[in-house]
Image (spheres, helix red, strand yellow):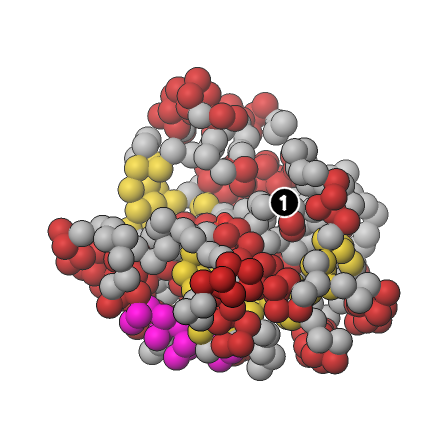
């Protein structure tokens, strides 16, 4: 719940969204299309989007830091991407055959992502991680997966437990208990804990993580952690999977692995990789990936191949949008522009929090910004620097009513976040967007300081 005054002001400005949400409640399960769109007093209904902006059904404009759940590094409706879709659509949207665009798309991934030797296309980040887990299990002949507290790897059974606070609850009902036996959950940022867990469990096929730190850097990784994980997994013969669903083509043109110079065995990518249309990929070492290959001996293949299907894998339409996007990203300027905008936002937001004496701080890297805020009444902390933490329970456990109140106050002022209290930027954001965002953030903090948000 958010406070009545915040809700009333929001309702007054968003009558159209409220009407659509009321209709949705009769036909859409739970009234929303994605858990992360749950919002108080109700979610926005968007009409159209262009560049860094989108407009709701009431005609309100937003500076968008959600960008198709992180998919749009070039911004909404980029002319080159639209042109590619318009050229391909009349030639057919789905052949049910292989086609040249799929090969060109895979070539771009191999060119850009340092560890990618072979690619297989799927339809979502969740599916990509399912395939990566199967490949790792087949390659090692082992059954277990090891994942870190707070990291998100999609909504499938295998990896559902452990990304929401508290980390040790199943995360969803409807998942059989036996699944949890095969998915080890360990604290992040502690190499000894990882090494011990792998020593005690000789049957781990893969370690999977978000190389940005949990939830696109909401919980930063400790310096040296990534390198340490690489060394330990290599030493113990465990497949290392980087979930680059968000960081792929965003943390650098070659993803987080390029930015940090640490290479995994397998990489999963969704979002930016598919140019804003539905699509995703798994890429990595040829010897692991080629387990999907037919050998010509059907009796052998029936027993020894990794099976992989998927009606919509790399449709021509998605491939066309993806190629247009990745060809621009390969030039490098898009990532640099998005990074510069995010850096300006982080700095400006942090200065606002400091000036207003608010118990919180701004942080993040690459094209991500995050805000941590203490809930009012205050925790008694007097020093902003003392709030800095890498504790996932703190950073991912901000109270829901605080988060929803801040989100509503930002939306009220034309700012749309990604999820929680953070956002992603695009190459379409400008300095004018930064100035407008900081003014809106300042006004939202003025409204909430001492009321929902703690002051020092
Ligand atoms: C790091 C990460 N992995 C996996 C997923 C799941 O991707 P999808 O929503 O395409 O299934 C997400 C989605 O946000 C993600 O952020």
Residue 72 visible in the shown view: no
Q: Residue at x 35, y 50 (%)?
A: 312
Q: Identify residue for label 1.
A: 157
Range covered by the magenta-colored residues: 103-116
The image shows residue 317, relative to residue 55, as above or below, that is below
Which is the main secondary structure of the residues drawn in magenta?
A: helix
Q: Position of residue 416 (x, y in %)?
A: 46, 45
| Horizontal relation, residue 34 to residue 1: left or right | left
| Front residue (pair 19, 357) | 19
Q: Is residue 150 magenta?
A: no
Residue 222 visible in the shown view: yes
The image shows residue 109, relative to residue 70, as above or below, that is below
Q: Residue at x 40, y 72 (%)?
A: 109
Crowd rating for badge 1 (residues with CA inside 10 Å; few <14, some 14–19, many 20+):
some
| Front residue (pair 23, 320) | 320
Q: Residue at x 56, y 25 (%)?
A: 5
């Amino acid at each position: 719940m958010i406070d009545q005054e915040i809700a009333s002001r929001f309702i007054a400005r968003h009558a159209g969204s409220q009407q659509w949400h009321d209709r949705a409640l009769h036909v859409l399960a739970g009234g929303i299309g994605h858990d992360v769109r749950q919002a108080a007093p109700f979610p926005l209904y968007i009409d159209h989007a262009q560049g860094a902006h989108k407009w709701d059904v009431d005609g309100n404009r937003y500076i968008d830091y959600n960008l198709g759940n992180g998919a749009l590094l070039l911004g909404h409706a980029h002319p080159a991407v639209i042109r590619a879709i318009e050229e391909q659509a009349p030639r057919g949207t789905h052949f049910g055959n292989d086609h040249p665009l799929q090969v060109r798309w895979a070539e771009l991934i191999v060119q850009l992502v340092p560890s990618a030797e072979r690619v297989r296309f799927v339809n979502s980040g969740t599916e990509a991680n399912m395939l990566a887990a199967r490949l790792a299990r087949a390659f090692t002949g082992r059954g277990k997966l090891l994942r870190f507290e707070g990291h998100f790897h999609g909504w499938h059974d295998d990896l559902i437990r452990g990304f929401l606070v508290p980390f040790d609850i199943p995360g969803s009902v409807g998942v059989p208990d036996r699944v949890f036996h095969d998915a080890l959950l360990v604290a992040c940022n502690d190499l000894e804990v990882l090494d011990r867990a792998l020593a005690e469990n000789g049957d781990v096929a893969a370690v999977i993580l978000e190389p940005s730190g949990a939830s696109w850097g909401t919980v930063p990784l400790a310096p040296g952690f990534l390198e340490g994980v690489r060394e330990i997994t290599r030493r113990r013969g465990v497949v290392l999977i980087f979930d680059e669903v968000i960081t792929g083509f965003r943390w650098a043109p070659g993803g987080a692995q390029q930015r940090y110079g640490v290479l995994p065995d397998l990489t999963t990518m969704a979002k930016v990789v598919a140019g804003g249309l539905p699509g995703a990929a798994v890429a990595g070492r040829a010897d692991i990936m080629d387990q999907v290959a037919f050998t010509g001996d059907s009796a052998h293949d029936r027993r020894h191949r990794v099976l992989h299907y998927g009606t919509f894998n790399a449709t021509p339409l998605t491939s066309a949008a993806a190629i247009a996007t990745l060809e621009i990203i390969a030039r490098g300027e898009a990532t640099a522009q998005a990074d510069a905008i995010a850096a300006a936002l982080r700095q400006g937001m942090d200065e606002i929090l400091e000036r207003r004496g608010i118990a919180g701080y701004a942080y993040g890297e690459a094209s991500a910004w995050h805000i941590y805020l203490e809930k009012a009444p205050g925790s008694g902390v007097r020093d902003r620097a003392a709030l800095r933490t890498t504790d996932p329970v703190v950073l991912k456990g901000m109270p829901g009513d605080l988060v929803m109140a801040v989100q509503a106050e930002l939306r009220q002022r034309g700012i749309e976040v990604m999820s929680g209290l953070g956002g992603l930027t695009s190459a379409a954001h400008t300095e004018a967007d930064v100035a407008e965002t900081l003014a809106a953030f300042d006004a939202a903090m003025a409204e909430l300081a001492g009321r929902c948000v703690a002051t020092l």
